[in-house]
Image (tube, coloured by chain):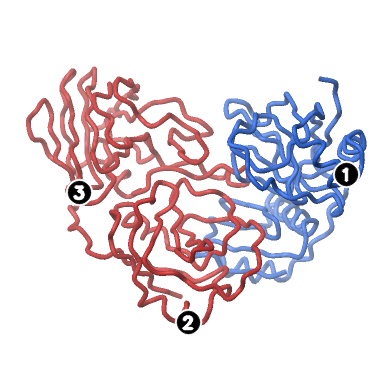
Chain colours: A red, B blue
Amino acid sequence: MIEVVRAGALTTVQDLGRHGLAHLGIPRSGALDEPAHRLANRLVGNPESAATLETTLTGIAVRPHVATTVAVTGAPAPVRVGGRPAAWGAPVHVPAGAVLDVGTATHGVRSYVAFSGGVDVAPVLGSRATDLLAGLGPAPLSGGDRLPLGTPAPRPCPVDTAPLSAPARDLVLRLVLGPRHDWFTEAALAGLPRARFQVATASNRIALRTEGHSLERAVHRELPSEGLVLGSVQVPPDGRPLVFLADHPTTGGYPVIGVVPAPDLAAAAQARPGTNVRFVPVA
Amino acid sequence: MKVMKVGTRALLVEVGSDAEVQSLHAEVLRRRAAGAMPTVGEIVPAARTVLLDGLDDPAALARDIAGWHVTEQAADEGALVEVPTRYDGADLAGVAAHWQVSEDDVVKIHSSAEFRVAFCGFAPGFGYLTGLPERYDVPRLATPRSSVPAGSVALAGKYTGVYPRSSPGGWQLIGRTDLVLWDPAREPAALFTPGTRVRFVPVDR
């Protein structure tokens, strides 16, 4: 059992999400920076599918009621246990009753906190993830919430290291054009590699929204709703592309100019508002 | 039939009508059940398309699909869900005026049609149902309601839908059901899945 002492700006329970249910209107959800979530679990000896906590900018403080091993990955942040500095990106022992405090991220947006045994809330449709679009899974955490922990694996923690990435000045996202790139003008497509966008403050777990540049449409008729994949870059009528992240709707009625390959989405999940964004079309 | 690449792991197959989407979707499910499809993570029908996501080799499947002969779906194929409905919605009179019939006739027309869940979206368990002739299309409300009660039976465009939970909404409300369409703790969680046949059965309030 862990008790939330300080919930932070937005902390949710996340795992690898719900799969195979998009035809029912159920988003995939799951950790936005999936490699960081997987790494945090490996560091504490969990399977990568165990649930972690995903924080947003300002971290979290929790008090475990039993001794546990934790690891913090993703956005780098000061880690303290019982008031003393502890390691980021490494297994850390937290005694029963001591407060684990993950502070404000020094760069990036989302930190992941894994506990040995994993956060063991009841799964909904095969996943413990909080889905903010569909309203599935546990609500975002509040101070005083108590969350159960699972039984730690008997095997010792595997040796692993967390590479500490430098803050990227620009977010560069590969873009596989289609399925509706032909709904945009030649000029919009030709100018795309040089176009500068910025991450908008309205970005969330559903989408990374952009501002600063508009993509002009050549086709102005309405698009009947069609299925969306993770990383779809949809262009609403204002011309400002948005990149769909884990809590994205399963269908949408604005043209998708291209798709950002999944490996690039971890960086998108860590880009702060104001960060420059470029799209690099690839075959 | 047009097959488009979506990213590195998905295909979007576009056809000409709702009926063709239903037939194509049924064909995909048949082929998957028969083991005649590569592994696919998500099969998402929509208004004019079926999305196939989580493919290892989308290019190979795209070539394969080009050679498919899609058979038309039989009218009585698929599970049937009956929705007991009190036709007392706030927009029943408005829909009657739009259709130029009486309110009783709205009930008759709507409850004698057989619908199919064309696709799901908007919220978990929300199905876009088709089945009314085109002359009964209705516009969305100019000003959406900030809250529509769960179980509301509503019309917009050519679609009928049932709100699985209370939410904002711009569809025209013609009635209400006590049937629970969506319950994540139940198996199945959603009563409306793509291809399901649906009838609305009038009941007294």
Report whether A86 appears left or right of A60: left
Q: Chain of mark 2?
A: A
Q: Position of residue A22 (x, y in %)?
A: 58, 46
Report whether A173 appears left or right of B159: left
Dot label at residue A162 = 3
Residue where numbered disc 2 is placed: A187
Measure how far apart labels 3 and 2 are at the Cα level: 42 Å
Dot label at residue A130 = none
Residue where numbered disc 1 is placed: B76
Instruction: Tell me if residue B91 comes above or below residue A261 in the rendering.
Output: above
Residue type at mark 3 is: Ala
Q: Chain of mark 3?
A: A
Report whether B107 appears left or right of B126: right
Measure how far apart labels 2 and 1 are at the Cα level: 49 Å
Q: Position of residue B166 (x, y in %)?
A: 60, 31
Q: Chain of mark 1?
A: B
